[in-house]
Amino acid sequence: MKALVLGGGGREHALVRALSLDPGVTSIHSAPGNPGISDLAENHVINVTDGLAVTELAARLRAELVVIGPEAPLVAGVADALRDRGIPVFGPDKEAAHLEGSKAFAKEVMEAAGVPTAKARVCRSASQVSEALDEFGAPYVVKNDGLAAGKGVVVTEDRALAEQHARECGRVVIEEFLDGPEVSLFVLTDGAHALPLLPAQDFKRAYDGDQGPNTGGMGAYAPVPWAPAGLVDEVMESVVRPTVSEMNRRGHRYQGLLYVGLALTSKGPRVVEFNARFGDPETQVVLDRLATPIGAVLQATDTGGLGSIGSLQWKSGAAVTVVVAAENYPGDPVKGDLIGGLDAANALEGAYVLHAGTAWDGVRDIKSNGGRVLNVVGTGADLRQARERAYEAAGRLELRGSFYRTDIAERAAAEV
């Protein structure tokens, strides 16, 4: 199988790495990729939201699988263009991807499907925002209705900050606050069958102790040892299957990945959000634990036959990823600083570095080129060992002004 992966972040590096470990995948291409990905795949510079450019590249490469990493190409309809050309693609079409592209649409689908989620109101004016904030009270949860690269949500006790975020976004969804810890569950589906992956937990706030602004994610771990028994089966029954069925009823067959963000509340699991692609940085730890070769599984979401796969196989042990972020992230991150220590970090047993926001500086040097610059993955027999290796490797990296959280998986590792 020849595979083409769209995107250039840490999630895509993790996908390329997983494909490189699949003996059935003979060659890998990436667009646009990044310096780390270039060690495993051939990078191509194109506009990944341009359906014509992507289909032309895939056809020229004779790709037998195109994996769409980020949300923007999905919402732009790139999967539609590939399917029209008969090229197998991992990712839902434009209408189905609206589940992520619009929080209001997702709420509408959940209500129609009877999916347990937070009460919410869609607001377009200051008066509607004020009424909704009054109704639900603090902590205030205000979500940009459209795509916001993982930073469109504000959860705050500060009423003025909630109102400011609503003004900046325009159309927003305001929800009741859901108590309880959050868990991410990825589910592969071909529109008829659904196959769950390993649950993971990520950390959204920028600083230790869940302080600071929301980010695209500062770290993650898998598995989740404290998750209630039967959680995955319950979510498949109460959330995933009803949602896929409702999308089919609307004429939008859902093929690809459904990301279910859950809050484990005192009243049971509730959906916080849907995404139409692999989450970042949870993908980095979930795929690290996957033992089943990934290529044919991703392809089956498009070509059918996912039901014949049965269940996925997982490695024993655990994985922890720590995000190394640039100075001033998530506000206006500093770019262009040289990165050192990559070889030293990769040399550590049970650890490796995935590139998330990097670029070449000359022929050999690598510089920062984004807010979340690197993902350091540590693996081990348990969360404690995986965490130790991740942080030891992170300590070997050199990037002026960079920072990372020091408490990723700390509580879960202590309880194992």
Image (cartoon, grey):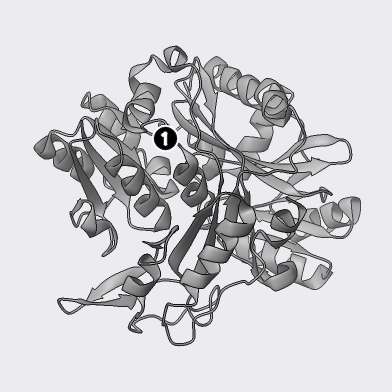
Quadrant for residue 126, please give it: bottom right
**Quadrant of the image containing the N terminus:** top left
In the displayed structure, 193 sits above or below 81; it is: above
Residue 414 or 230: which is nearer the viewer? Answer: 414
SS state under label 1: loop
> Which residue sits at x=37%, y=51%?
12
Q: Residue at x 22, y 58 (%)?
A: 38
**Residue in the picture at 29% in, 62% down:** 36
Given residues 330 and 128, the one toward you in this image is 330
Of residues 342 and 184, the one drawn nearer to the viewer in this rendering = 342
At label 1, counting other C-alpha atoms closer than 10 Å, the crowd grade (few under 14, some 14-19, many 20 or more) is some
Is residue 139 found left or right of 168 in the rendered image? right
- Asked if residue 143 is positioned above or below residue 3 in the image, the reply reads below
> Circle 1 is placed at which residue position?
94
Residue 146, image x and y in percent?
Answer: 55, 50
- Measured as percent of width and height from the top left, residue 70 is found at 41, 49
Q: Is residue 55 above or below residue 304?
A: below
In this rendering, does residue 151 appear at all?
Answer: no
Task: Compare residues 49 and 402 and report the one nearer the observer.
Answer: 402
Q: Pick out the residue farthest to the bottom.
A: 400
Residue 199 percent location from the top left of the image: 61, 39
Amino acid, disc 1: Lys
| Residue extending farthest left | 60
